[in-house]
Amino acid sequence: MALLHHSVGHDDLADRPVVSAPARSGASIFAIIAALVSFYFSARGREMWGLLAAFAAIAGGLLGGLRALSPRVSGGILSIAAVGLGVIALLFAVLHALL
């Protein structure tokens, strides 16, 4: 004889949609790393590489900001910080090249 298990009342998971946790935007993380690389190259006297890395940081931050508009991706503040760091790195590379 087999015993059957009947749930009385409700099934907790049956009525809920499956939702994954928000993920950080990889573009924003790339942008912050590119901004740090830009500072490194500018400080070492490689201003052209620093300038290119700063442009990559700004582009990555903007792309990360666009991706953060999706409800599945978080990191809007991270993208804003990446763009800010990219702009500062750009100014640092230009000023370091001029001086």
Image (cartoon, rainbow, N blue to C red):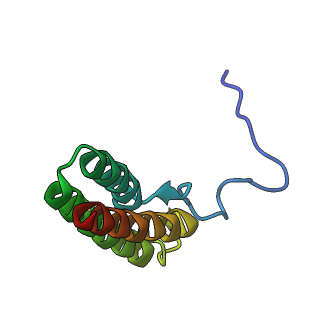
User: Compared with residue 85, is residue 2 higher up or lower down, i.e. above or below?
Assistant: above
Q: Where is residue 38 in the image (x, y as percent from the top left)?
A: 29, 54
Q: Which residue is drawn at 47% across and 75% down?
A: 70
Residue under the point 17% across and 51% down: 46
Whole-percent x, y for residue 63 in the image: 34, 73
Residue 49 % position (x, y): 16, 56
Q: Which residue is drawn at 73% across and 35% down?
A: 5
Q: How many marks?
A: 0
Q: Compared with residue 71, is residue 25 higher up or lower down, i.e. above or below?
A: above
Q: Residue at x 47, y 72 (%)?
A: 68
Q: Residue 24 at x, y = what percent?
A: 47, 56
- Is residue 91 or residue 19 the one in the foreground? 91
Query: Which of 61/95 is in front?
Result: 95
Position above or below: 40 against 61: above
* Residue farthest along the top direction in this orientation: 1
Q: In this view, does 78 lie to the left or right of 33?
A: right
Q: Quadrant of the N terminus?
A: top right
State which quadrant residue 48 falls in: bottom left
